[in-house]
Amino acid sequence: SRAPRIIGYYFSSVFDPFQALEYEEILEAQKDVPVRRGRPEFEMPAATFECLAQLSDRVFEPYGSLIGQLKIKPRRVAVLNSYTARVYGGKHFLLGYYANMQPLHFYSLLAMAQVPADIVFDQTIERFGLDQYDMLVLPKCEVLSESVVQAIEAFQQRGGIVVADQYLGPQLDAVRFDFDFDYRARVTANAIMKNEAFAEWDDHIDPSNTEMIAAEGVTAKVDQAIMEDYASTLRAGLTGMLQREVDCADPTVLTNLCEAGGVDYLFVINDKRDYDDRVGEYRAVLGRVVPQTATITLTNRDVVAYDMLRRTRLAMDNGKLNVE
């Protein structure tokens, strides 16, 4: 849906599908002999690879060459991921602990509210300006460079709308939202089951030898409910400020619009999920997709809609169509 130039499967070394067997060293005939032993099902669930096979059969093989030619349809909203804010904005990081992940939470709400947006950087604004956008979102921007602030002020003078959260430092006129994302660091199995969390986290710590702190856990379903409520608040707060080409009232339905050869390609992603049988007992991950039917509204009511997976024309009623 993001119009990739190449399609592949990214995996960590733990979940390498080509090395799904681990090795044990045993002593036999006075030499080490590697013996293969199957990984537990919870580590390498067969269903994961069955789904990848279905995706390959239904999407990648018949449409892979087309997907490689798609381009994201131009968007009118930009989200600033400011390196200046990451360096000079203090040590209060949201979930993720990594600089580039700080806009993720607000960006997720935009997706749930059917507001497609590009990520831009300080350099993007300084080099190319903001003329192609009508709205600029500033999540976690405690500090901005003078040149970026000046560009934003020029953007506003021509009618551009600025949206920000409670962290915005520069004195800019903005539509403000105050969303508390700090709780999301406690949507973990440790916090839920043991009332504790890692004092600090990155990809290289040893979980068995790391300081823990007291933390009241938040389940994934509670997190989903909070995020849906935030998305509803965001949608209401932006009423009348932007025009959506594609809309859906359900925050568990995500959309993305691409184009190629004068044809628009709409990706509709079902994000309605529940606990699964693998790790559902810990209530930290909604790992099972729940089938649903969604009503999509298109601004252009004169188009003809066609379901590429089922290879059939879709019925439209006053710009609305139902997808499963």
Image (tube, rainbow, N blue to C red):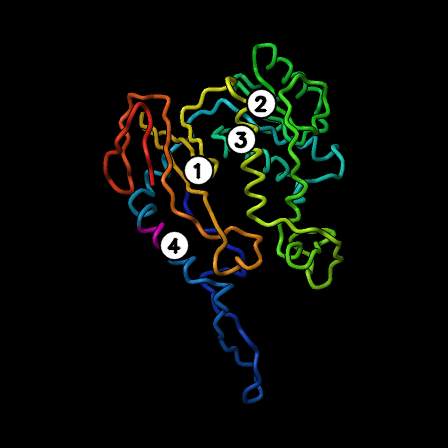
Identify the disc placed on residue 253. Answer: 1
In terms of secondary structure, where does tag 2 sit? strand
- Graded by Cα atoms within 10 Å as few (under 14), some (14 to 19) or many (20 or more), the crowding at tag 1 reads many
Residue 288: horizontal and vertical position, in percent?
45, 52
In terms of secondary structure, where does tag 1 sit? strand
Q: Up-down: is 55 above or below 311? A: below
Q: Is residue 194 left or right of residue 155?
A: right
The quarter in which the N terminus is drawn is top left
Per the image, the residue denoted by label 4 is: 51
Among numbered discs 4 and 3, the one appearing first in the sequence: 4
Residue at the image point whose x is 50% and y is 64% from the top:
42
Residue at the image point whose x is 73% and y is 59% from the top:
210
Q: CA distance from mark 1 to mark 3?
A: 13 Å
Name the amino acid, label 2. Answer: Leu
In terms of secondary structure, where does tag 3 sit? helix
Q: Nearer the viewer, mark 1 or mark 3?
A: 3
Name the amino acid, label 3. Answer: Ser
- For the magenta stretch, what is the residue range? 53-57
Per the image, the residue denoted by label 2 is: 136
Among numbered discs 2 and 1, the one appearing first in the sequence: 2
Among numbered discs 4 and 1, the one appearing first in the sequence: 4
Identify the disc placed on residue 147. Answer: none
Q: Up-down: is 299 above or below 294? A: above
Name the amino acid, label 1. Answer: Val
Residue 275: horizontal and vertical position, in percent?
50, 53
- Residue located farthest toward the left when viewing the structure as drawn: 312
Q: CA distance from mark 3 to mark 2?
A: 19 Å
Q: CA distance from mark 4 to mark 2?
A: 37 Å
Residue at the image point whose x is 53% and y is 56% from the top:
12
Q: Up-down: is 55 above or below 20? A: above
Per the image, the residue denoted by label 3 is: 232
